[in-house]
Image (tube, rainbow, N blue to C red):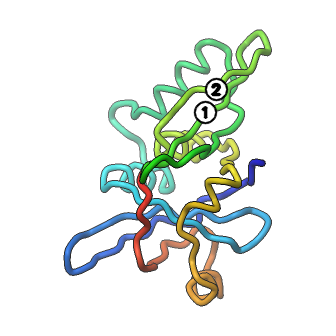
Amino acid sequence: MEIEMKVNGIVNLITPCECAHVLVLQRKDCPFLATISIDCSSAEILDRIKEGSPTKRPRTHQLINNIANALGAKIEKVVLNDIKGNTCYALICIQTANGDRTTFDARPVDAVALALRIGCPIFADEEVLKKVDVLSKQERRSVLDGMPNDALIFLEPPTKYKM
């Protein structure tokens, strides 16, 4: 079963050993939060999309959207569909110009960036949500109390899953 999610924020975690970035996803129907590690350049791309900053050259998610538009296809949704080892996987779901539906394997960060850029929904497979790091009730409460959904938030610890 697919659960609709939204991007709650990008977390910059600075530990004595490293600097890490975490994408925080929230279920649309409840305060459940899940985290997925992302690299520095991915965090920067997602932040630029959030700010509406233009880019000099098309990024991967922009290229995917440009190709879909040129072919008359519609990007319907993205789905975080699997975790293998410590890597998260995603699908981009497209309706072609003739009405057929197809999916393409994608890096989750590209899929999420695409969804944020064009406003299509983000889903996660229920089995994926069982595997990703879930924030404790106390962490969730501290994040959600009095903060807008699009706020930049700071949480620990970083997740072991990457995009």
In this rendered view, identify the residue nearer to me: 57 or 80: 80
Q: Which mark is residue 103?
A: 2
**Can you give x and y, in whole percent of width and height, for residue 162 in the image?**
41, 54
Residue 60, above or below 102 = below
Residue 37, above or below 64 = below
Ranked by sequence position, the earlier of labels 1 and 2 is 1
Q: Can you tell which quarter of the image residue 60 is in? A: top left
Q: Badge 1, how many Cα within 10 Å: few under 14, some, many 20+? A: many
- Left or right of 119? Residue 152 is left
Q: Can you tell which quarter of the image residue 127 is in? A: bottom right
Residue 39, above or below 159 = above
Residue drawn at x 48%, y 34% as measured from the top left: 61
- Which residue type carries mark 2? Thr
Q: Badge 2, how many Cα within 10 Å: few under 14, some, many 20+? A: some
Residue found farthest to the left? 17
Quickly name the residue at label 1. Answer: 92
- Which residue type carries mark 1? Ile
- Left or right of 85? Residue 120 is right
Q: Which mark is residue 57?
A: none
Find the distance from the CA under tag 1 to the CA under tag 2. Answer: 5 Å
Circles 1 and 2: CB distance less than 8 Å? yes
Res. 146 in view: no
In this rendered view, identify the residue nearer to me: 141 or 162: 162
**Can you give x and y, in whole percent of width and height, for residue 36 in the image?**
48, 60
**Can you give x and y, in whole percent of width and height, for residue 119 in the image?**
66, 44
Q: Secondary structure at mark 2?
A: strand
In this rendered view, identify the residue nearer to me: 28 or 68: 28
